[in-house]
Amino acid sequence: MTKDIRTLVSAAEARAAARSADALVRSAAERSGEIDVGLGTVESPIGELFVAVTPRGLACIAFEGEDREALARRFASVLSPRVLTAARMTEDARRQLGEYFEGRRERFELPLDRRLMTSFARQVLDATARVPFGQVATYGAMAGRIGKPKAARAVGAALGSNPIPIVVPCHRVIGATGTLTGYAGGLDRKEFLLHLEGDPTLAGM
Amino acid sequence: MSTRTPPPFEEFLAEHGGGVMRFLLVAVGPEHADDAYQETFLSALRAYTRVRDDGRLDRWILRIASRTAIDHHRRGARRPTPTETIPEHPAHDPEPADAALWSAVGALPPKQRVAVVLRHVLDRPYDEIAETLGCSNEAARANVSAGLRTLRETIA
């Protein structure tokens, strides 16, 4: 008898049923506003992007190949553990990124949640956000713009920690001799983004 | 084990969804399982900012699922399932050969049904079943054995 009741539903059948019911949980959670960090993905020419959006705004964009589980755990400990895949919360960010990569958008109109940035990184990245589409600036120039002209190296580190690449355009900051220098997402991606924006050079500053 | 922030809810859902669904499929029946599953995890999500991860989150979610299952029976058929959440397919297609057992399980009183499923489908220990039902260990054992006896008599 007790064996019989166990065989009514196997663990594998239950797992399959759970995976399809998860969609109901996600949409009901979104409707009731119970998600503090909504997750989503969007395809792009530089690989699938992972986005995290909170009620305050876009908090994170990660490139393909980054450890998404580790990122989600960081969101859980820094922001809130109520982290869940959320189609509507991430919709604007996903749509605007799609438009950017199709060449139909030069400016992002998205509120940002900057809680994943240190206060120094916040200053640097706020200044970075003001470098327009199709232009570049040097690390030294960015250091000057935040009033710390000797801090080019620290500026580089802050840019490297940018949790919202592409939208906060740290790819527009390059070396004084015009070399791309570095990019957390890899130099190929930095090159791709600058090419998409018309290959701006320092001469155009 | 030290207590800390629980894992991201997404990870929690992936880890415990299968066990909760297996419990609910038998405890409320395949036709109400999706509904109860959604209710269980929404209740968990509402409380999730206050819960500490003591390594026993499996107990916590099964407690919520059990409460949901018992409430479901209490509300019975008076409450129509919201049409928006009716899935295209039921969460599980029972085997015709198991029809008698399904209806016998379905006829058990709610507490007995929950106790039998926790014990004999999910292999949960009696102290946990007692905690879940808010009763003594003896009462938990009594619920399980009464439920099993009824099942045996009905099927025989």
Image (tube, coloured by chain):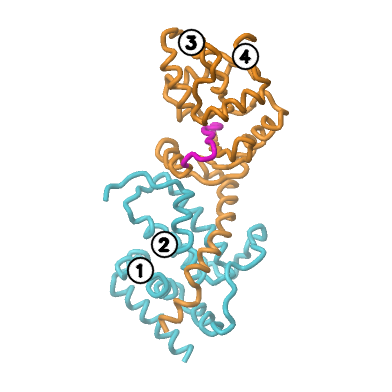
Q: Nearer the viewer, mark 2 or mark 3?
A: 3
Residue B133 place in picture, x, y as percent: 37, 67
Determine whether label 3 and label 1 are within 8 Å by CB.
no
Chain where mark 3 sits: A
Determine whether label 1 and label 2 are within 8 Å by CB.
yes
Dot 1 amino acid type: Arg
Disc 3 is placed on an element classified as helix
Q: Nearer the viewer, mark 3 or mark 4?
A: 4
Alpha carbon separation for disc pair 4 and 1: 66 Å
Q: Which color was chain B given?
A: cyan
Chain where mark 1 sits: B
Which of the numbered marks, if any, corresponds to residue B124?
1
Chain where mark 4 sits: A
Alpha carbon separation for disc pair 3 and 4: 15 Å
Disc 4 is placed on an element classified as loop
- Foreground residue among A144 and A22: A144
Alpha carbon separation for disc pair 2 and 3: 57 Å
Which of the numbered marks, if any, corresponds to residue A201?
4
Which of the numbered marks, if any, corresponds to residue B62?
2
Q: Which residue is mark 3?
A: A140
Residue B6 place in picture, x, y as percent: 39, 47
For the record, the magenta segment spans A56-67
Name the N-terminal-most of marks 1 and 2. 2
Q: Decide whether residue A63 is among the magenta residues.
A: yes
Determine whether label 4 and label 1 are within 8 Å by CB.
no
In the image, are marks 2 and 3 on the same chain? no
